[in-house]
């Protein structure tokens, strides 16, 4: 199942399933965060704008058609949410970027983030290909924050062996992700 809408003729105009839509949103989060950060002058607003954008996308999910540019749609929503936040700040007399500056930054940021491939869906696919013990090692190191030494003691393996395994896993994941990107 494709995490983002495709351009295949047979999928043109079809609505995305909830799972496809979820994967599409997950796939653009990093780019969307970067885009929002670049067009807002207050870091405190970024999380709110991201949340409002994601909520709007979910509420209007049935309006999105497969085969069209999901990322462009999401960025446009984020732009208008950011402009609304900017307008509210101007009304309260707070200092913000001028509208012209915001539009210029938005154009450059959209181009930058639109050209960077979404690696999260590819990573998700590649993680599924790992052996259970490899996935467990990654979870211990990166998600649970455990040290290799602690993990090696619990599993009666040397830390050096586990570090080599971890290095090989990372290299395989990188190669797998690169194969999936355009």
Image (cartoon, helix red, strand yellow):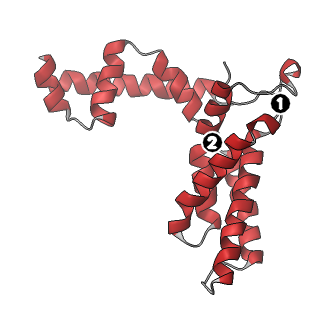
On the image, the x and y values in percent for residue 27 come to 61, 37
Q: Which quadrant of the figure has residue 12?
A: top right
Q: Which mark is residue 28?
A: 2
Image point 66% across, 34% down: which residue? 24
Element type at mark 2: helix
On the image, the x and y values in percent for residue 75 come to 72, 52
Mark 1 or 2, nearer chain start: 2
Q: Which quadrant of the figure has residue 71?
A: top right
Given the current orientation, which residue lies at the most extreme top position? Answer: 131
Q: Which quadrant of the figure has residue 162?
A: top left
Would residue 97 be seen by someone viewing this image from the given angle?
A: yes
On the image, the x and y values in percent for residue 45 come to 55, 66
63 left or right, relative to 160: right
Q: Quadrant of the N terminus?
A: top right
73 left or right, relative to 113: right
Image point 62% across, 31% down: which residue? 23
Q: Quadrant of the C terminus?
A: top right
Viewer-proximal residue among 167 and 45: 45
Element type at mark 1: loop
68 left or right, relative to 92: right
Q: Which mark is residue 67?
A: 1
Viewer-proximal residue among 40 and 151: 40
On the image, the x and y values in percent for residue 125 come to 54, 22
């Amino acid at each position: 199942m494709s995490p983002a809408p495709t351009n295949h003729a047979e999928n043109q105009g079809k609505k995305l399933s909830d799972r496809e839509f979820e994967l599409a949103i997950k796939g653009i989060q990093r780019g969307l965060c970067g885009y929002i950060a670049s067009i807002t002058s207050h870091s405190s607003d970024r999380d709110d704008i991201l949340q409002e954008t994601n909520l709007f996308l979910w509420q209007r999910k049935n309006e999105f058609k497969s085969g069209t540019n999901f990322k462009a749609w999401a960025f446009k929503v984020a732009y208008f949410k950011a402009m609304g936040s900017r307008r509210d700040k101007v009304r309260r007399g707070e200092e913000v970027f001028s509208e012209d500056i915001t539009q210029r930054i938005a154009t450059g940021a959209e181009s930058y983030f639109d050209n960077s491939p979404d690696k999260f869906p590819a990573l998700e696919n590649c993680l599924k290909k790992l052996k259970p013990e490899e996935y467990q090692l990654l979870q211990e190191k990166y998600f649970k924050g455990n040290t290799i030494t602690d993990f090696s003691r619990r599993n009666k393996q040397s830390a050096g062996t586990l570090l080599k395994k971890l290095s090989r896993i990372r290299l395989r994941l990188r190669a797998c992700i690169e194969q999936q990107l355009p």
